[in-house]
Image (tube, rainbow, N blue to C red):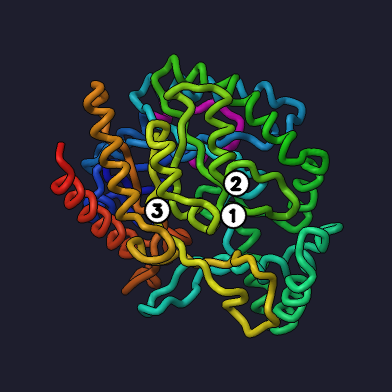
Amino acid sequence: MEQTWRWFGPADKVTLQDARQAGAEGIVTALHQLPQGVVWPIDLIRERIAEVEAAGLRWSVVESLDVSERIKTRAPGYQDDIESFKQSLRNLAACGLRTVAYNLMPVFSWMRTHLQYPVANGGSAVAFDATAFAAFDLYILARPNAEADWPEDRCRAAHAYLQSLSQGEKDALQSTILQGLPGGNGAFTLAQVRTALEAYKDIDDNAFRQIAGDFLRAVAPVAEEAGIRLSIHPDDPPRPLLGLPRIVSTESDLAYLLAQYPSPANALTFCTGALGVRPDNNLQAMVERFAPNIGFAHLRSTQREPDNFTRESPKTDAQTESFFEAEHLAGDTDLIAIVGTLVKEERRRQSLGDPHPIPFRPDHGQQLLNDHDRHAQPGYPAIGRLRGLAELRGVILTTQRLQPA
């Protein structure tokens, strides 16, 4: 398997040399400076390739080529954005890139409520507290009819939670949710979120599935012709947010999307952290079922937490929805078993003449040692990811040694 590392470009506080010293072989990056809906020009792609190669690495995976909000809502001009997406795929392929990750999460990409949640080893992690998010939704954003999306006991807990916060803590919660996490769609104001939500008022899950299917049938043939594996990332977290459609959260969701254009070009970014948040997702069964469809793997583990884990509050509904980023070989996900399936799949592909290893990255990481002093992108510290990559490398090498070729 190919060991990769996410890098957010020259402004990233964790450098390419850091990635190389951590043991990465490939880099996962994008042209983050470009807005949604524009064509990625060949000259900028080559410039990024040269930048990565100068550090002794290679650009292995594009993450992400964004699907514009105009495409997701079929707003005027969305056909132009689809054409730009297609041309970007052609340009990436012309430069030798063959794995492109993307997502279909509306408005926000991945979502967390806390960026410095203390963990038992003395470090910290990013976390999602469902009660804190409900407090934002119900009382800070004040989304119309939001109470219909939350059980009554969660609404009570959210109100009590918000009342327990100082004004500074309320501001921090709002900032964390609105700032736009790395790899997402940028920062928002409350007014901008309300406007963005309005664009989805008539788009439910079924309508969004139709939009997604039409999009895949438009772009996957281009990826297929170009030799690209277009790999969709699951919803993170895989649960409803702000009344928006969420259609990449479960095994049946993934099966539906793959069926829209059956081809190696229509593939998955199998994110064990995102999918593992739901206790009803059997990750081992999913990775075994979808192994031939995996273009890229995000290997991390989350730990579901009893609600509410940031404040003493009334007991909420029984569904566990809060979590934090656990150590890679701890938490609720058996990454050792999942790696075993991926190694087996890689060998199957090699037996059929596919020489390309499955790229993976140690997704996210806890802030450890002096990570706090570096102020890297939330969720992407240097030492925490180095530890995760080292652990996963050991699992992979051991699995390869023990599994007969």
Which x, y percent locates residue 87?
A: 52, 20
Q: Nearer the viewer, residue 207 or 196?
A: 207
At x 45% / y 59%, what residue is drawn? 377
Between the residue at mark 1 and the residue at mark 3, the CA separation in whole angstroms equals 18 Å
Q: Residue under label 3, please give it.
A: 363
Q: For numbered disc 3, what is the local secondary structure?
A: loop
Mark closer to the observer (2, 3): 3
Are discs 2 and 1 less than 8 Å apart at CB?
yes
Point out which mark residue 185 bears.
2
Q: For residue 44: magenta?
A: yes
Determine whether, in the image, residue 192 is placed left or right of residue 228.
Answer: right
Prevailing secondary structure of the magenta residues: loop
Q: Mark 3 or mark 2, which is nearer the start of the sequence?
A: 2
Callout 1: SS: loop
Q: Around disc 3, counting alpha carbons within 10 Å, would you say few (fewer than 14), some (14 to 19), or many (20 or more)? A: many
* Left or right: residue 262 compared with residue 371: right
**Mark 2, secondary structure of its residue:** loop
Tag nearer the camera, 1 or 3:
3
Q: Nearer the viewer, residue 363 or 333?
A: 333
